[in-house]
Image (tube, coloured by chain):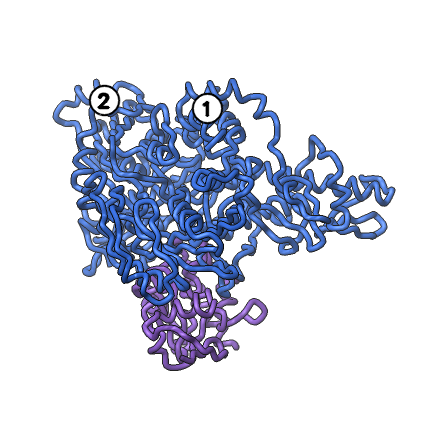
């Protein structure tokens, strides 16, 4: 099957029922999306399909219709996405394991809600679990990221 | 485990008599510095000036030999060296280095001694110094006990300053300039007339010099890096998906695997039928491992799927652990023969209680088992090939892992290469070696390719070594608006005995973890007693962020709050009256100011105060809550902490925020329960964590007045649960004596 990830077309020989997460991680070697729970509880595996945030651990790769963007495709060290730049400015990550998913969730959210309130941020970001407790900074950083995106 | 085990058996932790024996035989060894492990396999053209510095043509590598589990250990350790060595931030690489006695932790052992952090007695001073002897003698390379910064603060600055001095001497010899005319900046030695000589060029000559015996350290006023906001070295990688955790490792020819062991703890496996699993796509092998089986495949998901189809014949549990029975056993443990310690016994508690008669106050408190559940499930990569065993994993105990690998493989330790990886959290989980042993077992049974063993979340949740349950009994006497007597008994399983038991060691003497954060609090209550009771044959338990204090903060501070209210006193004023430790009094006053303590609140709102001294760090916290129609909302947490010296204020604040939310979320929602010998929870749907919308505002005020450098990973955790419960009492009048609080009251 064909799969477009971060602008690159891949030819994949895997079962259609394999979760997108494992096709990305183990078949394609794209390890930014993380395995945390496997049942859409933690959000560490969040990627974009057609620009929308999805849980790649429960999405069958055979059901993916459209281009996939992972954290690696969102921006790179020398070409950061505004959300990543804000994250670095606020020094959000601790262990960092959930942060790929947090950043992808925030980027998809801000694309449709460029001027969010605290309440909207809470609602949009509460599906992403962080065990280290970076939530205080996440609430702040989404505002910073929104401002950066509006300036851009 | 060879020499490490023999010494360990005699001396490790707590038993004062045993420690003295170790001291007598070990003093000469203690005076010698361990060998620099970087000298082994030193590449041509590479130089090492001490165990923390490697310089070659590619540049400068700083060795950061602790586990980075998210607390930023590699950044803070690198900063200590870079400060004295005059390196620019970012001009060097970091590497955790090999397991080595040279990377011993001189602070972690003392945490097990019954010495109050506020004590300045002869015994206390010598006991603390003795912790360094134990750590160095045993080569205890351990990450834990919030000891990383405290242990490294002097040692790594001295390493940086020593190396700088050697580079200066080398430059003076090469240029003929007097050494006092030379300076250093950004990895170069500069002459007075402006010529620059890079450390890379000078390193070979410097490495041939004898290290100076004494060096001067920079005064804090001259620091460029320390004490200033830093950019963590891992931040860009963690925000761009390029940070490689152990679970992300990719090696040529690597296979993917998973392991299942008996969910009935300790039950073992009588056999398994893997016919269907072996026929599944991508499955390479299904093999027995200790207590279960492993599936090796070409993809992790295929291994997971195949493991689910293996029909295992599990043995019955070794103990049919059940939560109700464990609590009943703890409740039955307040007896003389199970008494473990009584480090605090002031005044005459029995007489005070007898005099009070029926007016004495009694209450029982309990805290549950808790899972670590770091977001990265346990994993390790192992490869057994050509007489060499390689292991890639995140571990807080690299030398114990090396010893375990030697035991499993029959190899000498020099044939085993352990490559430390960054971890997606740990909270104490990676103080265990079970998951690494499983990867090694698979590699030994399937030689050749590297095999990455990854647990499912379910395996991780069911095979944790939890924070132990505890039951506490409080009796107290109040009179004249004051707390007159406070008697606290705590019955729990011994973390120390359980953890050490798993590496074949028995531990003499009492376990301070059973009463940590309770016996050692600086309050001058006239009749004040804290007694630990050990619940025998309880389930295997382990260190969980803030260890014994994690539950004891709740037990001590809710019980004290209850007595203060019974006395009709104000929780802040009475604690201030009782507190004998001046830095701690400042913290209590600070959280009082921060929270406008004493000003009236509308009905349904409340403030709760708690204070815990743990890991040498006093922390006071006030939690503010509102009782809403949808449940309790946690509005704010005010934190005041005394830590002696802050190395990176940005990361410091993050650790405080994280510790507060760790303590808060578990206090509100989390418990790990057992039935019929197995863990009842399996994933984050039934082991509930705090979410962003439940996160309060957190305000942190930091004091650096004692000058004593301490760690901050754990101390913010213990006071938040009692501060929350005390706030709920203030808001609602409901005194909750059991965690998680959600069993008694709803949250927004």
Disc 1: which residue: B124
Q: Is residue B427 in sight in this rendering?
A: no
Query: Mark number for residue B337?
Result: 2
Could you tell me residue B121's position as x and y percent?
46, 21
* Horizontal side of residue B16 vs B330, given as left or right: right
- Foreground residue among B408 and B123: B408
Q: Residue at x 39, y 35 (%)?
A: B503
Q: Which chain is purple?
A: A
Could you tell me residue B161's position as x and y percent?
68, 40
* Horizontal side of residue B253 vs A49, given as left or right: right
Q: How many C-alpha atoms fall within 10 Å of the one at disc 1: few (<14), some, or many (≥20)?
A: some
Could you tell me residue B408's position as x and y percent?
43, 41
Q: Quadrant of the C terminus of chain B?
A: bottom left
- Foreground residue among B719 and B142: B142
Could you tell me residue B303's position as x and y percent?
35, 61
Q: Colour of chain B?
A: blue
Query: In which chain is the residue bearing label 2?
Result: B
Q: Residue at x 40, y 81 (%)?
A: A66
Q: Secondary structure at mark 2?
A: helix
Rendering quarter of residue B97: top right
- Foreground residue among B485 and A30: A30
Rendering quarter of residue B564: top left
Question: Does residue B541 lie above or below B672 as drawn?
Answer: above
């Amino acid at each position: 099957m064909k799969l477009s990830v971060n602008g690159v077309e891949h030819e994949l020989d895997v079962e259609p029922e394999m979760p997108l997460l494992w096709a990305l991680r183990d078949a394609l070697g794209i390890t930014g999306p993380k395995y945390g729970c496997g049942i859409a509880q933690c959000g560490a595996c969040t990627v974009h399909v057609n620009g929308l945030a999805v849980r790649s651990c429960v999405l069958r790769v055979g059901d993916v219709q459209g281009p996939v963007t992972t954290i690696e495709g969102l921006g790179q060290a020398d070409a950061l996405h505004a959300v990543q730049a804000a994250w670095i400015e606020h020094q959000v990550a601790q262990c960092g394991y959930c942060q790929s998913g947090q950043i992808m969730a925030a980027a998809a959210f801000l694309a449709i809600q460029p001027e969010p309130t605290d309440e909207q941020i809470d609602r949009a970001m509460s599906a992403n679990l962080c065990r280290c407790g970076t939530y205080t900074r996440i609430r702040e950083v989404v505002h910073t990221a929104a401002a950066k995106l509006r300036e851009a | 485990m060879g020499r490490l085990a023999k010494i360990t058996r005699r001396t490790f932790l707590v038993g004062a008599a045993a420690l003295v024996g170790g001291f007598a035989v070990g003093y000469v060894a203690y005076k010698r510095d361990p060998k620099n492990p970087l000298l082994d396999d030193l590449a041509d053209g590479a130089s090492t000036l001490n165990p923390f510095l490697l310089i070659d043509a590619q540049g400068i590598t700083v060795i950061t030999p602790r586990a980075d589990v998210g607390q930023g250990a590699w950044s803070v350790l690198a900063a200590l060296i870079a400060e004295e060595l005059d390196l620019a931030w970012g001009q060097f690489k970091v590497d955790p280095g090999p397991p080595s006695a040279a990377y011993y932790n001189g602070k972690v052992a003392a945490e097990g001694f019954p010495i109050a952090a506020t004590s300045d007695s002869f015994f206390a001073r010598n006991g603390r110094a003795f912790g360094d002897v134990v750590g160095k003698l045993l080569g205890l390379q351990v990450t834990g006990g919030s000891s990383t910064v405290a242990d490294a603060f002097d040692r790594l600055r001295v390493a940086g300053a020593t190396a700088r001095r050697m580079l200066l001497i080398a430059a003076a010899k090469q240029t003929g300039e007097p050494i006092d005319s030379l300076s250093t900046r950004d990895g170069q030695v500069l002459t007075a007339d402006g010529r620059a000589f890079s450390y890379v060029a000078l390193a070979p000559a410097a490495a041939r010099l004898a290290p100076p015996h004494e060096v001067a350290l920079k005064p804090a006023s001259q620091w460029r890096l320390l004490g200033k906001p830093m950019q963590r070295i891992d931040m860009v990688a963690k925000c761009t998906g390029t940070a490689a955790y152990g679970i992300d490792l990719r090696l040529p020819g690597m296979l993917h695997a998973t392991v299942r062991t008996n969910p009935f703890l300790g039950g073992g496996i009588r056999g398994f039928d893997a016919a269907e699993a072996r026929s599944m796509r991508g499955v390479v092998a299904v093999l027995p491992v200790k207590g279960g089986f492993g599936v090796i495949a070409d993809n992790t998901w295929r291994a997971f799927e195949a493991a689910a189809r293996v029909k295992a014949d599990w043995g019955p549990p070794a103990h049919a652990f059940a939560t109700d029975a464990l609590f009943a056993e703890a409740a039955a443990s307040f007896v003389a023969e199970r008494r473990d310690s009584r480090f605090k016994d002031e005044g005459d508690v029995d007489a005070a209680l007898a005099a009070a008669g029926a007016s004495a106050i009694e209450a029982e408190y309990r805290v549950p088992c808790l899972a670590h559940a770091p977001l990265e499930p346990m994993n390790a990569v192992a490869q057994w090939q050509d007489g060499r065993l390689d292991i890639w994993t995140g571990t807080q105990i690299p030398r114990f892992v090396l010893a375990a690998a030697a035991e499993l493989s029959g190899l000498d330790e020099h044939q085993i290469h352990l490559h430390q990886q960054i971890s997606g959290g740990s909270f104490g989980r990676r103080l265990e070696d079970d998951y690494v042993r499983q990867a090694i077992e698979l590699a030994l049974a399937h030689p050749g390719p590297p095999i990455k063993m990854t647990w499912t979340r379910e395996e991780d949740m069911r095979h944790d070594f939890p924070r132990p349950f505890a039951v506490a009994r409080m009796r107290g006497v109040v009179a004249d608006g004051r707390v007159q007597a406070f008697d606290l008994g705590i019955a729990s399983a011994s973390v120390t005995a359980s953890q050490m038991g798993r590496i074949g060691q028995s531990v003499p003497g009492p376990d301070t973890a059973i009463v940590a954060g309770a016996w050692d609090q600086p309050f001058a209550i006239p009749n004040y007693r804290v007694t630990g009771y050990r619940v025998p044959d309880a389930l295997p338990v382990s260190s969980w962020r803030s260890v014994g204090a994690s539950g004891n903060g709740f037990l001590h501070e809710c019980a004290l709050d209850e007595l203060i209210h019974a006395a009709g006193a104000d929780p802040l004023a009475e604690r201030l009256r009782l507190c004998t430790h001046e830095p701690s009094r400042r913290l209590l006053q600070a959280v009082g100011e921060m929270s406008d303590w004493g000003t009236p609140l509308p009905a349904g709102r409340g403030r709760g105060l708690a204070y815990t001294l743990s890991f040498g760090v006093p922390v006071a916290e006030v939690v503010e809550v509102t009782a809403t129609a949808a449940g309790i909302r946690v509005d704010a947490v005010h934190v005041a902490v005394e830590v002696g010296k802050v190395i990176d204020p940005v990361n410091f604040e993050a650790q405080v925020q994280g510790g507060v939310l760790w303590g808060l979320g578990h206090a509100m929602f989390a418990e790990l329960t057992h039935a019929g010998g197995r863990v009842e929870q399996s994933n984050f749907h039934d082991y509930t964590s705090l979410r962003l919308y439940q996160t309060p505002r957190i305000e942190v005020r930091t004091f650096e007045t004692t000058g004593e450098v301490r760690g901050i990973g754990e101390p913010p955790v213990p006071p938040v649960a009692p501060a929350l419960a005390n706030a709920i009492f203030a808001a609602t009048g409901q005194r909750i004596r059991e965690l998680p609080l959600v069993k008694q009251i709803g949250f927004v």
